[in-house]
Amino acid sequence: MTTTAERILDSAQALVQVRGYNGFSYADISAELSITKPSIHHYFPTKAALAEALIARYRAGFAAAVKEVDDSTQSARQRLVDYAGLYAATFAQGGRICLCGVFAVDAESLPAEVRRATDGFFDDQRRWVAGVLAEAGVPAGKTGSAAQAYLAALEGALLLARAHGQPDPAAEQDRDVVRSVAATLVDALL
């Protein structure tokens, strides 16, 4: 991808993670990057195409970060807490929340292809969390629902953190909301 396309994706991702899918337009990106709207359309003909590219990039980046967590020699419990740190790190970027969490909030107004891409991200996360829970000894019949609860808690923790206002980079409690929820739920599940 060209530098311009990456800049467009960076701008769009920041806008989506703060305002939502329906809270930004190509005009916002155009103004921020000082490029024309037709330039944006050259790379991403539709807003849905832009959203799909955002999700693909986010999904790949998240998969790489999860691999780092998974490759650690930590216990399953610690890996689940470290995984929550990925969500906390997202929030530390100016109060952003999970890109696909934002898309999930807007699901009813999203094009079908964007909903499918969002579902794909969450399928990846559910599989990984369920696998780590199974490794930790959670019975096979409960790993799926436990993984759903864990992911819901992380996404909800981001929303609660956001409800408290913009994060203060000097205040660890902003990041600890997510980690605290994760650790509490992991202790309850294991």
Image (cartoon, helix red, strand yellow):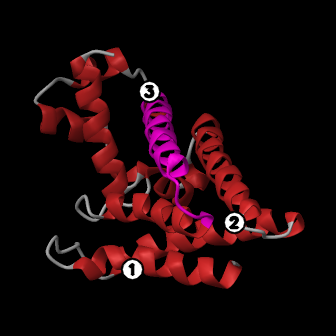
- As rendered, which of 11 and 177 lies closer to the eye? 177
Q: Quadrant of residue 94?
A: bottom left
Residue 177: mark in rendering? 1
Q: Residues within 10 Å of mark 1 (few under 14, many from 20)?
A: some
Query: Can residue 100 be seen here?
Result: yes
Q: Amino acid at mark 3?
A: Thr
Which mark identifies residue 10? none
User: Which residue position holds label 3?
Assistant: 46
Residue type at the position of mark 2? Gln
Image depth: mark 2 or mark 3 in front: 2
81 in magenta: no
Highlighted magenta segment, given as a residue range: 49-76
Q: CA distance from mark 2 to mark 3?
A: 32 Å
Cα gap from disc 1 to disc 2, whole angstroms = 19 Å
Q: Which quadrant would the C terminus be assigned to in this image?
A: bottom right
Is most of the magenta stretch helix, strand or loop?
helix
Marker disc for residue 148: 2
CB atoms at circles 2 and 3 under 8 Å apart? no
Structural crowding at the residue carrying mark 3, measured as other residues with C-alpha within 10 Å and reported as few (<14), some (14–19) or many (≥20): few
Residue sitting at the far front:
73
Rendering coords of residue 80 (x, y %): 55, 65
Mark 2: give few (<14), some (14-19) or many (20+) Cα within 10 Å.
some
- Quadrant hosting residue 158: bottom left
Q: Residue at x 44, y 51 (%)?
A: 99
Front of the two marks 3 and 1? 1
Q: CA distance from mark 3 to mark 1?
A: 36 Å
Q: Helix, strand, or loop for circle 2?
A: helix
